[in-house]
Amino acid sequence: MREAVHSVVRPQQHSTFVRRALFGGAALAVVASVGGGASGSDAPVDDATTVAAVTPLAVAAPAEGIRAVDFGEVPQPGTACSEGLRFTPPRDIPVAAGSSQVLDLAKLTQLTVDPEVTYGDLDGDGADEAVVHVTCAFGANGATDSIHVWKVEGDQLVHLAGLSEPTDQATAGALPSALEGVAAGDDGVTVTWTRYAAGDPNCCPSEQARMTYALDGDTLAPAGDAVVTAARP
């Protein structure tokens, strides 16, 4: 099995961007200056309307193959920010240099693409697919993670499947799990989720759960049981 493992990259701006933007009109003016909506308008999105999709989730692929794709420049599925928007998410969210514009000014919603992409032949056709992790940050501390599988079909880069939540095996109690690491190989995608044990404080999950998912058409389906271990120090 060819496997590439990486820990989820959470750029510092995910936590600091929101805090800075809350401090006074000067910071909000900066947000407004860069906060054009996903529809391409010069004005930030600041009402309960649907953002129009501007590109389909199939774009021109480089001749060198999927490993030559810069996913920091590829539109990402709008569903990745469904929890961070006050309106129906667009079909896709344009990004440049790894980040979207501010999508919803009231919630300061912004999508960021992890620069670390992992690869594996998930469908057994002899060609690699790419597994891309994205984070949608919103509000004071909100963030949702999701992973997305892409492949080259002909001369196009096509989005195949996405995953944003662990199975019940990987969760415990009422506190949500967070995506902590991704490994793609020819036998599937292994995702590490944080896991709260009974009595864990909100800040500090003491366990982690590793789940392997197989590509099944347009779905990442669980392949086997979760492996629960102590959280990494």
Image (spheres, rainbow, N blue to C red):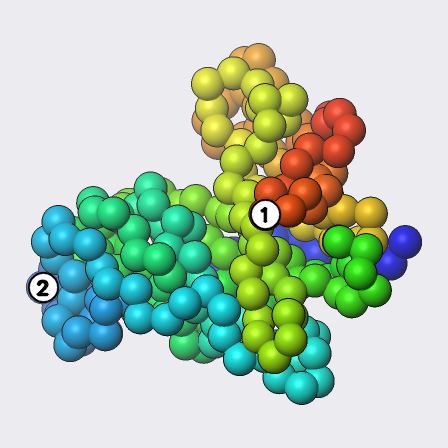
Residue labelled with disc 2? 25
Q: Is residue 121 left or right of residue 218?
A: right
- Camera-nearest residue between 103 and 55: 55
Q: Are marks 2 and 1 in contact (CB under 8 Å)?
A: no
Furthest residue in direction right, as rendered: 1
- Residue 193 visible in the displayed image: yes
- At 61% from the left edge and 79% from the top edge, which residue is drawn? 155
Secondary-structure class at tag 2: helix
- In which quadrant of the rendered image does the N terminus lie? bottom right
Q: Nearer the viewer, residue 194 or 39?
A: 39
**Residue 67 in the image: x percent, y percent?**
70, 75
Determine the residue located farthest toward the bottom in the rendered image. 63
Residue 4 seen from this side: no
- In space, the residues marked 2 and 1 are separated at their CA atoms by 44 Å
* Figure quadrant of residue 129: bottom right
Residue 25, given in percent of the width and then of the height, sits at 9, 64
The residue sitting at 55% across, 43% down in the picture is 163
Quadrant containing the C terminus is: top right
For residue 157, side relative to residue 212 (left or right): left
The amino acid type of the residue labelled 2 equals Gly
Q: Nearer the viewer, mark 2 or mark 1?
A: 1
The residue under the point 33% across, 42% down is 83
Q: Is residue 78 left or right of residue 62?
A: left
User: Of residues 212 and 24, which is closer to you in this image?
Assistant: 212
Of residues 232 and 157, the one nearer the viewer is: 157
Amino acid carrying mark 1 in the image? Asp
Residue position marked by numbered label 1 in the rendering = 218
| Residue 64 badge | none
Residue sitting at x 73%, y 38%: 212
The answer to whether 18 is drawn above or below residue 156 in the figure is above
Can you name the residue that lies furthest to the front here?
154
